[in-house]
Image (tube, helix red, strand yellow):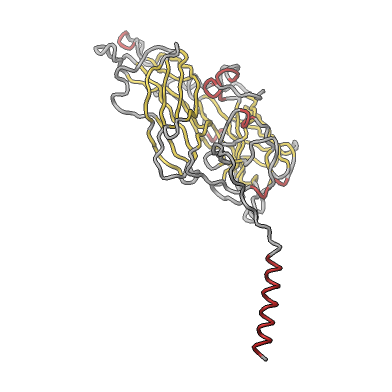
């Protein structure tokens, strides 16, 4: 009798459990869908997790993960001149500077297979100049990126270097699948440096013009310190070699100042573009400065508990303004907005096929600390790939 009661009880419990679990919805992935190009939610581990005009809910603010599909990060591409104080066409001449192009960039990638990329360079008349296999330089585990760059071999200049300035072409190909990840052009100029003695008359610093960077800014999330309460970062380019201690970045919400880099914030120099010889930094030296505030973060999931004095701005919809001062004088201004728990994406990244998903924002260049070509962004941005939909 006891066995019979136990059997009935067990049967009822099993039936109850099946009824309870029957309420769970299991999502089955769709099949037979065409494969698309990998699209990460980040650049260097930084993301806004949105690249459309729609905004995402704060529940989606999870740290993105790289995959074994490499993704070229266009905002990291640096094309520059590598120079040597000799010229192969005139081997007996001394102090005769010539140059060859070199590139470097980052790829969002976590795979174990070696990356293989090819760079091709073209003369101003469109003919192939030379090509080179790029080298893997280093990996950054924090941001899940791999650096690729031109070789610095000793024979790189032989039969290749030139002394001519002008507009040259570049194409970068992923050799694993023969896909072209970038194609553009870059403008080369030069300035005289060193003594004015006759023996140095052919000594020049060759450089790639980079003024187009100045009015183009970025806003994103940096998960490096805390993936559940990531920092808001705003990046802007400046010309000349400026000191971090002279910067102050102020963050305003609906017209009211809510944070400053002078109070638990930071102005950090994270990217530079310059020639081998930097005697004239007012003319040919560019830096990207990133501004962040410990008191201005995003709340991702259950994060934010460790920052009682911080404002979780993804829960504060509205317009934000960043004003940058240098030695007490305002030199930059940019804006971004928050809605539905995330950045409002203006769609510029998507229109221009940016896979790193930083939001691109216009930057107002102010003050007199820089002399720059104010129209260059219209034609030269991203090495001959000006931004569709971008305006100042």
**Depth check, front residue: 257 or 365:** 365
Q: Is residue 262 visible to us here?
A: no
Q: Nearer the viewer, residue 365 or 335?
A: 335
Residue at 47%, 14% in the rendered image: 167
Q: Residue at x 58, y 43 (%)?
A: 32
| Residue furthest to the bottom | 1
Image location of residue 380, percent across then percent down: 55, 19
Q: Residue at x 43, y 13 (%)?
A: 165
Q: For residue 113, say whether it is visible.
A: yes
Please say if 249 is above or below 22: above
- In terms of depth relative to the viewer, which is nearer, 317 or 24? 24
Q: In the rendered image, which quarter contains the C terminus?
A: top right
Please tell me whether residue 99 is drawn above or below residue 271 in the rendered image: above
Whether residue 30 is situated above or below residue 152 in the rendered picture: below
Residue at the image point whose x is 40% and y is 25% from the top = 102
Specify the farthest residue to the left: 92
201 relative position to 346: left or right: left
Classify residue 19 as left or right of residue 64: right
On the image, the x and y values in percent for residue 118 come to 41, 28
Residue 93 horizontal side relative to residue 203, left or right: left
Res 54 quadrant in image: top right
Please identify the quarter of the rendering in which residue 321 is found: top right
Q: Residue 136: which quarter of the image?
A: top left
Single out the residue that lies furthest toward the top: 198
Q: Please provide percent x and percent y for residue 6.
A: 66, 85
The quarter of the rendered structure image containing the N terminus is: bottom right
Q: Looking at the image, how many numbered discs can be counted on the residues?
A: 0
Residue 194, image x, y percentages: 37, 16
């Amino acid at each position: 009798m006891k066995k019979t009661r136990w059997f009935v009880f067990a049967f009822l419990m099993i039936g109850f459990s099946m009824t309870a679990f029957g309420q769970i919805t299991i999502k089955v992935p769709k099949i037979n869908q065409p494969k698309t190009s990998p699209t990460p939610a980040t650049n260097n581990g930084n993301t806004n997790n949105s690249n459309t005009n729609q905004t995402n809910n704060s529940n989606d603010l999870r740290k993105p993960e790289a995959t074994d599909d490499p993704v070229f990060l266009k905002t990291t591409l640096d094309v520059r001149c590598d120079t040597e104080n000799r010229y192969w066409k005139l081997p007996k001449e001394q102090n005769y500077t010539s140059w060859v192009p070199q590139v470097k960039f980052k790829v969002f990638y976590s795979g174990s297979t070696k990356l293989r990329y090819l760079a091709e360079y073209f003369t101003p008349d469109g003919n192939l100049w030379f090509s080179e296999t790029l080298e893997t330089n280093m990996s950054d585990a924090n941001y899940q990126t791999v650096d690729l760059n031109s070789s610095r071999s000793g024979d790189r200049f032989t039969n290749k270097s030139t002394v001519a300035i002008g507009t040259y072409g570049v194409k970068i190909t992923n050799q694993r699948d023969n896909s072209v990840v970038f194609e553009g052009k870059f403008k080369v100029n030069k300035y005289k440096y060193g003594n004015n003695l006759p023996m140095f008359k052919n000594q020049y610093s060759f450089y790639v013009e980079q003024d187009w960077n100045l009015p183009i800014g970025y806003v994103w999330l940096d998960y490096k310190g805390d993936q559940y309460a990531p920092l808001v970062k705003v990046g802007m380019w400046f010309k000349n070699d400026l000191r971090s201690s002279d910067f102050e970045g102020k963050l305003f919400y609906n017209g009211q100042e809510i944070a400053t880099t002078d109070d638990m914030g930071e102005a950090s120099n994270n990217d530079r573009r310059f020639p081998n010889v930097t005697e004239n930094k007012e003319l040919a030296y560019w830096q990207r400065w990133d501004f962040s505030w410990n008191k201005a973060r995003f709340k991702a999931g259950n994060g934010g508990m460790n920052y009682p004095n911080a404002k979780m701005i993804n829960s504060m919809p509205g317009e934000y303004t960043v004003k940058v001062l240098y030695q007490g004088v305002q030199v930059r201004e940019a804006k971004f907005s928050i809605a539905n728990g995330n950045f409002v994406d203006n769609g510029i990244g998507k229109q221009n096929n940016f896979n790193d998903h930083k939001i691109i924002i216009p930057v107002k260049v102010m003050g007199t600390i820089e002399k720059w070509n104010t129209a260059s962004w219209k034609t030269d941005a991203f090495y001959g790939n000006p931004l569709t939909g971008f305006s100042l």
